[in-house]
Image: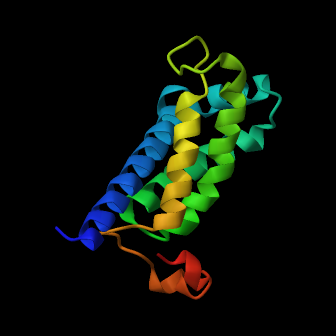
């Protein structure tokens, strides 16, 4: 294997990891906690209901886009506010995510993954872009 192929494989694994976790958490909020339950949790944090809806949308749509490799850099950048918000929500619960209320180690890892994906792009086997909306996305975010 060459350095370039190793880099592509590493970027692909990072992309798939972030996309899978985002999608899983969005679907968890949608089907297990339900939208009303998620809204209630966000309200308990002092956040408006719209934040819960936007978070579920961002996690599901962003997760699918990142998994498929569509506008990977853009999707990773757009996931950062959600992930930083998750970090904020868990920061007072201690380090370990297995602790009561979930600590901040896992959200911090997801922030790091999103930054890595935003820097690396989609890696190998990414669909890259859709011609219909391609004209609206800056060139630097099309990887």
Q: Quadrant of residue 83?
A: top right
Residue placed farthest to the left in the image? 1
Q: Is residue 65 left or right of residue 34?
A: left
Q: Residue at x 54, y 53 (%)?
A: 114
Relative image position of residue 54 (x, y in whole percent): 67, 48
Relative image position of residue 116 (x, y in whole percent): 50, 57
Is residue 129 visible in the rendered image? The answer is yes
Q: Is 6 located above or below residue 80 in the figure?
A: below
Q: Quadrant of residue 86?
A: top right
Q: Residue at x 43, y 39 (%)?
A: 24
Q: Is 55 located above or below residue 91 in the figure?
A: below
Residue placed farthest to the top in the image? 100
Image quarter (top left, top right, bottom left or bottom right) of the N terminus? bottom left
Is residue 61 visible in the rendered image? The answer is no
Relative image position of residue 22 (x, y in whole percent): 49, 45
Q: Residue at x 63, y 52 (%)?
A: 80
Coloring basis for residues: rainbow
Q: Quadrant of residue 75?
A: bottom right
Q: Is 134 located above or below residue 23 in the figure?
A: below
Q: Residue at x 70, y 29 (%)?
A: 89
């Amino acid at each position: 294997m060459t350095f370039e192929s190793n880099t592509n494989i590493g970027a692909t694994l990072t992309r798939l990891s972030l996309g899978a976790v985002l999608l899983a958490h969005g679907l968890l909020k949608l089907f297990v906690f339900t939208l009303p339950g998620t809204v209630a949790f966000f309200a308990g944090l002092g956040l408006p209901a719209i934040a819960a809806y936007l978070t579920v949308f961002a996690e599901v749509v962003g997760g699918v886009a990142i998994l498929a490799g569509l506008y990977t850099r853009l999707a990773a950048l757009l996931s950062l506010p959600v992930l930083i918000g998750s970090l904020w929500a868990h920061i007072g619960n201690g380090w370990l995510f297995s602790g009561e209320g979930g600590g901040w180690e896992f959200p911090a890892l997801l922030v790091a993954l999103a930054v890595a994906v935003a820097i690396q792009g989609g890696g190998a086997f990414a669909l890259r872009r859709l011609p219909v909306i391609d004209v609206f996305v800056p060139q630097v975010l099309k990887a």
